[in-house]
Amino acid sequence: MNNFNKSNFFSRILHEIRRIIYIMLDEYRIILKDSGLVVIFLGATLLYPILYPSIYRNETVRDMPIAVIDESQSARSRDLVRRLDATPDLAVAYQLNNLEEAKEPFYKQKIHGVVHIPKDYSQKIHRNEQATVSFYCDMSSFMYYRTMMLGANLGIVEAGKDIKIERMNAVGITGRSAEISATPFRYNKNILFNEPMGFASFLLPVVLVVVIHQTLFFGITMLTGTLREEKLATVDPKLRQKGRFFPIIFGKALCYFSMYVVICSYILLAVPRIFQLPHLGDPLDIIRFFTPFLLAVIFFSMLVSVFIRNRETSMVVFPFFSLVLLFLSGFSWPQSNMPWLWKTFGMIFPSTFGIQGYLKINSMGAGLHQVQFEYIALWIQAAVYFVATIFAYRLQTRTKERKSMIADCHSA
Amino acid sequence: MSNSIIQQIRNVARREWKRMLTHPVYLLSSIGAMLFCYLFFLTLMSEGLPRQLPIGIVDGDNSSMSRTLERNVNASPQVEIVGKYASFTEARKDMQKGRIYAIIDIAPGFQSDLLANRQPSLSFYVNDVYLVAGSLSYKDLTYISELMTGFILQQSLQAKGVTGEENLMPILQPIAMDTHQIGNPYTNYSVYLSNVLLPGVLQMLIIMFTIYAIGVEMKQGTTREWLSRGNGSILSALTGKVVPHTVLFMLLGLLGLFLLYGVMGFPMNGSIAWMALAMFLFVMAHQAIGIFIIGLLGRLRDSISIGMFYSLLSVSFAGFTFPIEAMPRGVQIFSWLFPIRYYFKIYVNEALNGADIRYSLIYFAGMLAFLLLPFLVYPRLRNTIRQQDQSAIKKQQIQ
């Protein structure tokens, strides 16, 4: 008796597994037959990770053109101009006579900064006074401002060093002790994890995670919308006897998951190595971290797709949300300075934790235990969205069954 | 029957309004999306410049000098020490967890080496994975280190009898920097981003909405009814279709200008009227691009994908985050194909720099040029619509 029950149980399990696999293959078939879905799942995931590194290949602004107005026309001022030009950041493109002349190239955006050395510059240095140099920065982009400040600081410090020593000699601090007084301690500035202070290394890891998140979201919602539009049941009706939706949910999820294991390996592991983006992390940790991420995104998208009636809906309504997700992750405006409302709001979306976790593991070489917070949060999201999807599907099949029952009654 | 073209357009436009109101999902979601983004981006960065960025310190010296340094760091509004660590490894681990953006490392014997003139060294480490937080703490820590150097030098100078600021400063800092941040004197980070990012969101909505509004007629086979309102004229049918959207998006765009330059008080050194005109052309140019895409491809599903691809690239090619000149040469050319690039240039000239309008005229002309796009695909679009129409008639006959 007991034995019979057991074999019955096993055969049922086997039967369920067969159904799940059937549904998974069915889902694959639907995707491959639909050119629009192929474009999202295979085209976009292949193209975007190549496109963005090509755009941002140069990482940073070098030799940014500036204008110099040297009213002092002295050996001292020419020395300063030379030093500014020698910095990797700046290049003197124009030597002009006055500020009025600088307006033309500045407004034409041919230069992104103006240096004004006043008439009394060298006199002040000779008279042992503090000389002042004016810097005008183009503020249209953070990169222009940063480049100008880096270059200007470097040039000024270099030009000032000799003057400092000369003046100390004058007050009686000489030789080695002058040098020590000028630099009582050295400070080493170290940039960690993003050596070239590069824009690509900063932006691209984030974009890669958003690409995974958004292609899954748009793909799944588009797929569901299409099926609903074509009045097809979400899955072959023969498989939906008894209103069983567990195999449907599992089968679909398995399809997306297996597909994205391959896609993620390409995007998260191969692309950073091909394009020489930061990749300090242990690949195994990345794979382990992205397991709950994929599950969370899949169930999140399946949940939203319950409300999608048409093929195009999500693509028309939600493209802007990619930008919102990008900023919610705190990669640009730091998370520590975000209003709590938005920080909390960000926790709804798997991308927030996915991006933070990927940055920490991939770009900073953190181990999985150091991203425990994100890792656990993703598992919680996966669980919550899974349960919510079950409820949503149940509700949906019930209303559908009721409707078809009513229809049957009418036709009878 | 022979009503004027104006009347035809009015009829089509009236139908379009009704369609938008009877299926309000798209109308509400585009208004909702824009309002949400205004709220989101303008409140997200409301601090302007990130303050009190969390950093850590490893004080191996634990002397009066190292504590002075710590006090100096905490006195700066930009950074704040939130963690003290016994070892650098410990601090680095916390940095990898994303809790701190920078580490100051003071080696044991710092003070005694300093007093013995042995030039000790002080290290700081900045996490530049978070470029903004990293750059800002880098700048601030450099500044504080310079300040400390000055402080110590000042003491040895005072020992030599040099006192008073007018005597000390020329030695401490022989050349002073007088920095002018044109148009954005407080280095407000939101000014960099919101001014272009928000139009970036608007253009996405315009392109997708335009493609959808035209494409859905073909998809649902309602072109016959649509054309009949325009008395069979495709020109009036198209114009009547997009004019209600122009009004809607123009209102949303103007609201954006009001929020940016009125409510938030972002720099506006030129004339708001020119910005409003730029916004008007911006809306029209993107509608034209939407028509171009659906006209060229004909099918709603393909057009939606291409529209999304284009509108996402638009944000990169505005050039407000990473400058176009720093991109590879072959890539730079593409920036001409995005109206948001011209809008960005006009914004920089007008709002930020307050330049004369003659510098911006070329960019206005650039946006105008996009309005020619629908005429390029007009014959093709007409054929597609007619074909749809005929197949609809056939269907009816069969039935």
Image (cartoon, coloured by chain):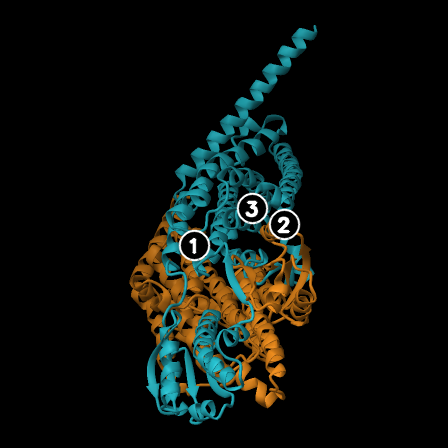
Residue at far top of view: A1
The answer to whether B331 appears left or right of A255 in the picture is: left
Where, by quadrant of the figure, is residue B34 drawn? bottom right
* Residue A255 to residue B109: above or below: above
Where is residue A53 shown, x and y percent of the image?
39, 55
The answer to whether B398 appears left or right of B123 in the picture is: left
Does dot 1 land on a helix, a strand or a loop? helix
Q: Earlier in the sequence, mark 2 or mark 1?
A: 2
Residue holding disc 1: B304
Q: Which chain is cyan?
A: A
Q: Are marks 2 and 3 in contact (CB under 8 Å)?
A: no
Residue holding disc 3: A366
Can the viewer see residue B174 in this picture? no
* Residue A401 to residue B152: above or below: above
Type of amino acid at the residue the image marks with label 1: Ile
Q: Residue at x 67, y 66 (%)?
A: B70
* Residue A111 to residue B140: above or below: below
Same chain for the residues under marks 1 and 3 in the image: no
Neighbourhood count class around disc 1 (C-alpha, 10 Å): few under 14, some 14–19, many 20 upward: many
Q: Are marks 2 and 1 in contact (CB under 8 Å)?
A: no
The answer to whether B327 appears left or right of A395 in the picture is: left
Q: Nearer the viewer, mark 1 or mark 3?
A: 3
Chain holding disc 3: A
Q: Which chain is orange?
A: B
Does dot 2 land on a helix, a strand or a loop? helix
State the separation of the CA atoms marked 2 and 3: 12 Å
Compare residues A164 and A358 and report the one nearer the observer. Answer: A164
Compare residues B391 and B52 and report the one nearer the observer. Answer: B52
Residue holding disc 2: B90
